[in-house]
Image (tube, helix red, strand yellow):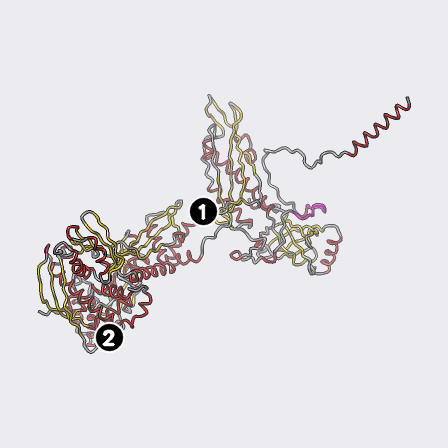
Amino acid sequence: MMKKIAHATVIALVVSVVSACQSGPARQTVDAMSSNRASNATVARSAYDFRDDDIKVPAYFDTQGLQKCTFDPANESEGCPLKKPVVRIYFSGTDVGGEGQGVEALRSYDDKQLLFMLENQFAGINRFRIITRDDDVIAAEKQTFLEQQGAAALAQRASQQKVLQPDFIVKLDTLRTVKSEGSITGWMDYTLELTTAVLNPFTRELMSYPNLGKIRVKSEDVRDRSELKYVMVNNRYATGFRYHDAAHVNAVINDMASRGIDILLTRMLSEMPATAQVLGIKGNQVSLDRGQNAGVLPNETMIIFQYEAGFVEPIGVAHVNPSRNSATGEIIRWKSGSLAGDIKKQAAKGIYRPGQGVKIFAVSVGTPAGFLESRT
Amino acid sequence: MARHLLLSALLLGSSSAMALPSFLVDGGLSVDGCAYGRGALAVEDAKATALQELAGVLQSPGMFAESTAHEELDTETIQWLRQLHDKAVEGLQVQQMPVTISGSRIEGNDTCVTITLARGTLPGHLADEAGGWESDVPEVSVTVTGEGWPDPENGLTARQQAELDALRRAVSQVVGVWLTHQRAQFSSLEERATGDHSSIALNDVVSQQLHTRSEGLVKEWSLLDSRKLEQGGVEVTIQAVVEKQKLASAASDVLTAIGSPRVTVSGPDAVVRPLKAWLMENGIEVSRSASLRILADAQLKASGNNRLLDLTITVEDLSGQQYGLWRNEPSLLALPASASVQADLIEVHLALPEQKEALHGELQRAFQAMVAQGGLVREVRVRKALLREPDKLHAMLTTLGGARDVSVVTEGNYHRASLRYAGATGELASALRQSLRPIAAGTLPQAKISREYEIIFE
């Protein structure tokens, strides 16, 4: 009997050893749910709210070739990473198909004013050079110029300054949908989806960068559901939200589009962060070599880091305000560690200037906190 | 039967009521010109009107009378006016005179300017040396034949037409002689015209340009013979005395004016008006009949609520041969659609120095191209029945002196030939009559010239 048990034990051991040697499938991915929830704006935290762990270099910083930048918009070097592409903006694919309750009013939405709004907002963040498509205002101004300054002056002016040639076009595709819920008392539920493409109209190449993804805005983001309620009597509209009236529908869509554009801006600022070189640090004060000209915005939260031989070493987080061609900031929190500690010590004694072969840069972490409140 | 033609340059309406000039205190000559409207365009129009007025006044016998009637005028002034008058009759171009133009002023709906010719101003001496062509003899006498048919449109009888034709031929003949002797003097011009036949073509161009002033160049003429032609035509043979000095100066004048050819302008009013004013301003003579014409076409291109201007200007001869094409750059400017948008756009486009230069350059190129290609294209139509050996027509025309680029087709009852000829259409008609004789079925009828470039043997 003992012999049998010993035999069984040996077999069990062999089996367990063999099974332990076999490796299972690598688990590198996880299942995730695709979401149809409304998008939200993501903005940078204030530098004051940063903890030590948060001080890391964000994605898309680009420090190669900064020395090549001339910051002359008309004559910027191709090698400058901050060279702003000249773009024209288009809305496309704005048609709404199908028939049904409220579809007609949704279809008649005019996106021209929205386009101009988008142009204005994009111009302000200084990541692109925008060629406006507001032909009417331009033509009206030229007419006034002609009346006040004369044909010769207008001809000279018009020939001296040519319309910029776009490098790319920025295309916004929108998808508008509506559904109604309820029966006697119902409510409308609008959804606006925005995708952005940067494309070269001549090669037809869609650029992979900046990748702004898809933005989904729902009517409940901008209106309380009660505001979109209506009452039907005998299957006909009686009272409440005038879903069949284009003006009323436009008001809702405009708000949604405006919110969509805000989100778009914040994504753009994260995808295309502002980068500047640190000229010196004195105490907590940092001096940067570029400001508005490189797209640095007021109240920018920037990570200060040392860049050497392809490696980055965060030093701290700063709250930065730009002037026209430079910027100054205050390091709110120094990263713990020997490098940051050394620099902090040196900066406390006087002006710290990065030595030979060492470069210190500042990169923005995204839309400045407060930007949405003050600029949108 | 000698007739003095000095004052016959006042032909056809130039003696009509002209605004007589007002004489300034210092003896200068000033003329007012007005044009309807406001702005730069109206000012240019007014300038053009004033220059035309001045030209008319200088040629008019009225001016002469006026000047002599002014007792307070000193002899010097009267002498100057007399010289001016003589020069004007010789074909002086007012555009070449150094006039002062006053600032514009508003008079009712019109904008007016005053142009002043300071006392003693005379046009510069042009090619005063006659070079090697027997300069000791001041005049050349030539015998020429001219043909003419009644021209009710311009109120001319067949006789008058024939005389004019003869005078033109006389001038053309002398120009030919002059050019042969003067070849070296305008070598710069020859360099500009390319091709073997440039010199012949130049002769053609110069004589054509001189045609309208032939009356001033012929000092006197006498009728030698006259006979009636079919269809009410008249043929005259005259002996004309051409003043070499005047002709030489006028011909040089034309040569220097190669950059400013005489043209007709046609197209929509909104383009033609500013274009004419602009041509005038730039010394390009605009006339109702000219061998070159400028066709302007203005199209408005819509871009949303705004309009762009697409302006095409073609230079072609009467047969439709194109010598030059100029297009504006529509992208320069867009203005909001309105009733005056076309006029506004044209004004701005023509105000642009680069576009102006390009247009001027194109006109010059067109003119030179015409010279280089061997003259203007003429059409010859010969009724089939008139030719015994039609197959030889092409060969015949090709051997014709001064003819180039001959092509012959048969259409309906006619043989139709197209060719470039370095000479006047009338000369070509006579030459054709001579050279077609060997292949003609019988006596060839008189050729009819229609629209200045078409020769028809009915």
Protein chain holding label 2: B
**Is most of the magenta stretch helix, strand or loop?**
loop
Closer to us: B168 or B406: B406
Which residues, given as a range, are shown in magenta?
A49-58
**Residue A119 visible at all:** no
Give the image quarter of residue B453: bottom left
Q: Residue A19 location in percent, x, y?
A: 78, 31
From the image, state whether disc 1 or disc 2 is nearer to you: 2
Q: Which mark is residue A150?
A: none
How many numbered marks does the figure carry? 2
Q: Which residue is mark 1?
A: A134
Quadrant containing the N terminus of chain A in the rendered view: top right
Which element type, helix, strand or loop, lies under badge 1?
loop
The residue under label 2 is: B130
Cα separation between marks 1 and 2: 66 Å
Q: Is residue A134 above or below residue B161?
A: above
